[in-house]
Image (tube, helix red, strand yellow):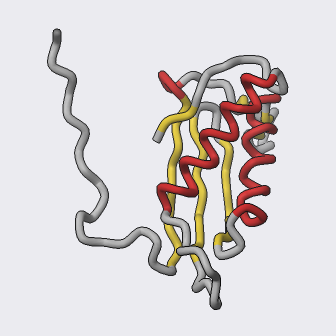
Amino acid sequence: MTDLPRRKQIRLPEYSYSAPGAYFVTICTQDRKCILSHIAVGEGLAPPETRVTVIGKCVEEQIHALPQRYPSVTIDKHVIMPNHIHLIVTICEDPGGASPSPTLCDVARVLKSLGLYLQLEGRCQTAASLKV
């Protein structure tokens, strides 16, 4: 068996990612396949334009649905690129909620699993999954 390269640990070991705050998150497609959008080059001085694919639209639906699933979470901004997405996820104080606040990993896990579920259900054209 070949040794796989070790990924650099970018998370702080003692930090609680359920703490209130804003987090910048990047989620990549499996094998970095360009399945979420296409970049159309503008003519003349027109800027490039991002055109979201059917799969990208499925992912965008799930991004917009996250606050309904987790009331203490808001998605401030997001960008869908051809092979990854960027999100600014804000976890707010949960004023008296009975369940604990979701962690950043919970939010990413739900986004990825719902996107895969929609693909397997047939709402998207391919079963390429997302990975962090």
Residue 84 is situated, as x and y percent measured from the top left of the image, at 57, 38
Residue 47 located left or right of residue 88: right
Count of all numbered marks drawn on residues in the image = 0
Q: Is residue 102 above or below residue 82?
A: below
Looking at the picture, how far across and down is residue 72, in whole percent? 65, 75
Where 92 sits versus 6, above or below?
Answer: below
- Residue at the image position 71 percent from the left and 73 percent from the top: 71
Q: Nearer the viewer, residue 102 or 88?
A: 102
Q: Is residue 39 visible?
A: no
State the residue at coordinates (42%, 68%): 17
- Residue 2: quarter of image: top left
Vertical comparison of 19 with 6: above or below: below
Q: Position of residue 67 (x, y in %)?
A: 73, 65
Q: Quadrant of residue 129?
A: top right
Residue shown at 81% from the left, 33% from the top: 43
Residue in the foreground of this view, choosing between 9 and 69: 69
Q: Position of residue 60 (x, y in %)?
A: 76, 46
Q: From this viewpoint, is residue 47 visible?
A: yes
- Residue at image point 68% right, 63% down: 77
Question: Is 28 on the left-hand or right-hand side of 120?
Answer: left
Extreme-bottom residue of the structure? 95
Task: State which quadrant residue 88 falls in.
Answer: bottom right
Q: Is residue 106 left or right of residue 96?
A: left
Q: Residue furthest top?
A: 1
Q: Which quadrant would the N terminus be assigned to in this image?
A: top left
